[in-house]
Image: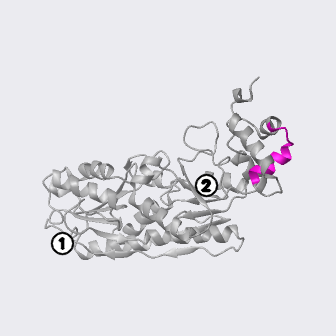
Amino acid sequence: MDDRASTRPTLAAVAARAGVSVSTASLVFSGRGPVSDAMRERVQAAAAELDYAGPDPTARSLRRGSTGVIGVVTEDSLADTFRDPMNLALLDGIGDGLGEERLGLLVIPRVSTYPNRDAGIDLAAAPIDAAILLGCSTDVAPSVAALRRRRVPVVAIEAMPMDDVVAIDLDNRDASRRGAEHLRGLGHRRVAVITLPLDSARTRGEVTPARLAPSAAHHTIERRAGVREVLPDAVAYSASGSSVDEGARLARELLDVPASGRPTAIVAQSDLLTVGVIRAAEQLGLEVPRDVSVLGFDGVRLEGAIEGILTTLVQPAVEKGRLAAAAVLSALAERGDAPASLHSELRIGTTTGPAPAS
């Protein structure tokens, strides 16, 4: 039987074709041993005849004990991950933080810790040396458990505190509180919040105590809590994701009612949601901020997306990525650096103004 009939030619087959030992053929491909030019040419010719590209990189990484790859874990699909400007900023920061290290990044979408589930890539088998769990996760515990069993270092961005996990945190509650104080100072009392997803099913709907109790969406809970510390009567509705369409969909439900029953201000937990809110208001014939004020969170670049300047909480997304990368490098070197926390700034733009008269 021709060796080329197999699905993947082996080093042993190449050695047999060249008439040398497997160890000699291995030295040719590793480039680390004393092999004559004639012997090297024989092995390379045999490899070309069998269409052999070299040793299996997975097997080689197992022998070496590392892959040289950092996993970046997200609950979004790959398409949604790369559409979100916050994720892109985080990845920029991670890449910058890794610097000249000989490490690759593997973006792992919609993680499943069970091999037979269709929700995503199985973390128990992903070829990575360490993992960075992106922010805005609704449930990081299963991912952390799978990685702990493998003794893979974990860095979590904006997640609840967990043992053996390095946290890169953001002042979500305090920032949202400062945003709410700005609205209260403008006279707003009827305020609604459009939150990021509250559960792994990404259920849309009113945020109630019954839905909050089991939720592990740390960032969503903290941002909502900050608003309600200042405006305790603020109602909240969860979106199924951070997108313009989601913001518009929920805003239409909140705003397409008589003036006496609609909120005078809407707080959205991402700038993409906020753009949707503004577009929905305009479609309903409402003027921002005369009829409704809009406050966002993130500080992403929105050139051409809206008129004016968005009032928002600006977070240091690139710096978050840099700190996450530094934490990974420290964990791999077993230095054990402390968690880090970052601060957001309130940027007052043109989308908030005095509450309309009753």
- Residue 132 lies within the magenta run: no
| Magenta range | 18-30
Decide: few, some or many residues near mark 2? Use Cα within 10 Å; few <14, some 14-19, many ≥20.
some
Q: Tag on residue 141?
A: 2
Q: CA distance from mark 1 to mark 2?
A: 42 Å
Image point 76% across, 53% down: which residue?
30
Q: Position of residue 170 (x, y in %)?
A: 48, 71
In x, y percent, where is residue 116?
63, 36
**The residue tagged with tag 2: helix, strand or loop?**
helix
Of the two numbered discs 1 and 2 in the rendering, the one whose residue sits closer to the viewer = 2
Q: Secondary structure at mark 1?
A: loop
Q: Which residue is mark 1?
A: 354
Q: Which quarter of the rendered picture does the C terminus lie within?
A: bottom left
Indicate the colouring scheme. Answer: one colour
For the residue pair 11 and 260, the one nearer the viewer reads as 11
**Residue 25 highlighted magenta (yes or no):** yes
Q: Residue at x 40, y 48 (%)?
A: 240
Displayed quadrant of residue 327: bottom right
**Which kind of residue does numbered mark 1 sit on?**
Pro
